[in-house]
Image (cartoon, grey):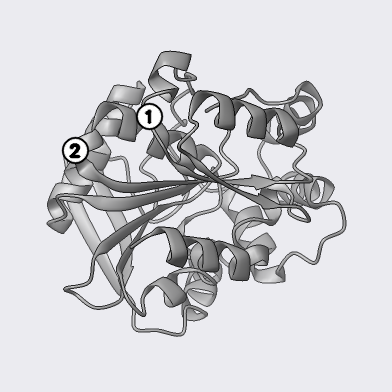
Amino acid sequence: MSFQDAYDALLARWDVPVEQLELSDEFGTTHVNACGPADGPPVVLLPGHGATSPVWFAIAPRLAERYRVYAIDLIVDAGRSTNSGRTPKTPADLHTWLSNTLDGLGVGRAVLCGHSYGAWIALTYAIEHPDRIERLALVDPTDCYVGLRVPYILRALPGLLRPSRERNVSFLRWETQGLPIDPQVLELAGLAAEQPSTPFVRTKRPTDDQLRGIAPLVFVAGRSKSHDPARLTRRVTTLSPDATVVQLETATHHSLPSLHADELSAALAHEVR
């Protein structure tokens, strides 16, 4: 199966009408999968590195009952966004790209939700552009409150240096620790590793003072191998005491968001008004 076929197969499982939008700016073309009522409050979803936007297949349709949902392919990653213009090299470049995308969608303020690397983009964007954020949701955020564990980095390194379908699938199976990951999610993630893409912008963790100024909804994967879940929880509750923390005790970092859609959807529906 080709990457595009795998992308379409997972997108078909949204089981709601999906508009595939193409927005152009100085960085190239950004692909957005949109669903839900056109006049609904906007919710923007950012995937983790290598996951691509169809991975929200179990979340987006539920949110679309009330919200206008925009799931975006990152400009610096595999997917249907194409970095054919200026190359994003800094967090500020990514923030400009996201502002351009929101402008192109006609969205002034939105609920912004990201997973993993997408959570880092969402968090740093919210810090710099609080006027564009209605509510911020972070799904097992990486390099936001705590850094990555060394064993996780070492295990991921071969797939980063020499990306391949087999290495990526092996890495995801290792991190998810026997959980029943959807085969179509694995297929798309494996094929995504072999797609040409712009190198992702290196993360820079926000300062403690910056983190004290926000109050996100944070989902913590209790079995995550990417970072220490208990330390992540402590840091969030200490630095962002007004944050809402949802513990997903059986989740690992890469079993999100698809395998725990019930818990994610319920918490988002309760917190996002």
On residue 131, which mark appears?
2
Q: CA distance from mark 2 to mark 1?
A: 13 Å
Looking at the image, residue 262 lies above or below residue 130: below
- Residue sitting at 70 percent across and 69 percent down? 182
- Residue sitting at 74 percent across and 33 percent down? 230
Which type of secondary structure does the marked residue at label 1 adopt?
helix
Residue 41 in view here: yes
Residue 1 in view here: no
- Residue sitting at 39 percent across and 19 percent down? 210
Task: Name which of mark 2 and mark 1 comes first in the sequence.
Answer: 1
Residue 34 pos. (x, y %): 30, 69
- Residue sitting at 54 percent across and 42 percent down? 49
Quadrant showing the C terminus: bottom left
Residue 59 pos. (x, y %): 50, 69
Compare residues 56 and 50 and report the one nearer the observer: 56
Residue 136 pos. (x, y %): 38, 45
Looking at the image, residue 105 lies above or below residue 86: below
Which residue ends up furthest to the right in the rendered image? 178
- Displayed quadrant of residue 60: bottom left
Q: Residues within 10 Å of mark 2 (few under 14, many from 20)?
A: few
What amino acid is found at the position of numbered circle 1 in the picture? Thr
Q: Give left or right: position of 261 versus 135.
A: right
User: Total number of numbered labels?
Assistant: 2
